[in-house]
Amino acid sequence: KSFPSGHTTAAFELGIAMFLVLNKKYSWVFPVMSVLVGLSRIYLMVHYVTDVLGGVVVGTFAGIMGFVIMNAIRKKTQNTKFAKFDLTEKFKKKKA
């Protein structure tokens, strides 16, 4: 048993980030799945409740901070050459 639960932390980090980024009609699914991961850790008796709650706090904070940082980067680079970079153009086959 470890504090915080790594599985719960990762699930909440991803779940909160996806909730903030995706269409609100479907994004609620991700936090619900995160809660189920946390509950499964308790049910399987591999973590204490406090471990899971710690994972919820750390994962939620990390998900929000990741979203905030990426928005800041996007805003800083929106009128630069970096913003116009399209990786798919690099892999398209050139016509002979």
Image: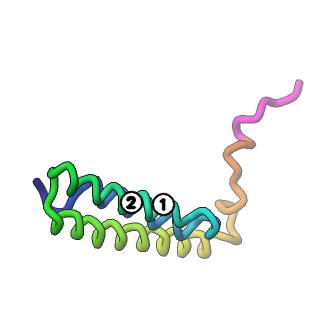
Residue drawn at x 69%, y 54% as measured from the top left: 85
Residue drawn at x 22%, y 53% as measured from the top left: 43
Q: Amino acid at mark 1?
A: Phe
- Tag 2 residue: 34
Q: Residue furthest right?
A: 96
Q: Mark 1 and mark 2 in contact (Cβ < 8 Å)?
A: yes
Label 1 crowd bin: few (<14), some (14–19), many (20+), radius 10 Å = some
- Tag 1 residue: 30
Q: Amino acid at mark 2?
A: Ser
Residue 91 placement, left or right of 71? right
Does residue 43 lie above or below 31 as drawn?
A: above
Task: Give the colour scheme of this rendering.
Answer: rainbow
Q: Nearer the viewer, residue 54 or 41?
A: 41
Residue drawn at x 44%, y 63% as measured from the top left: 32
Q: Position of residue 21 (x, y in %)?
A: 57, 66
Does residue 42 lie above or below 19 as drawn?
A: above
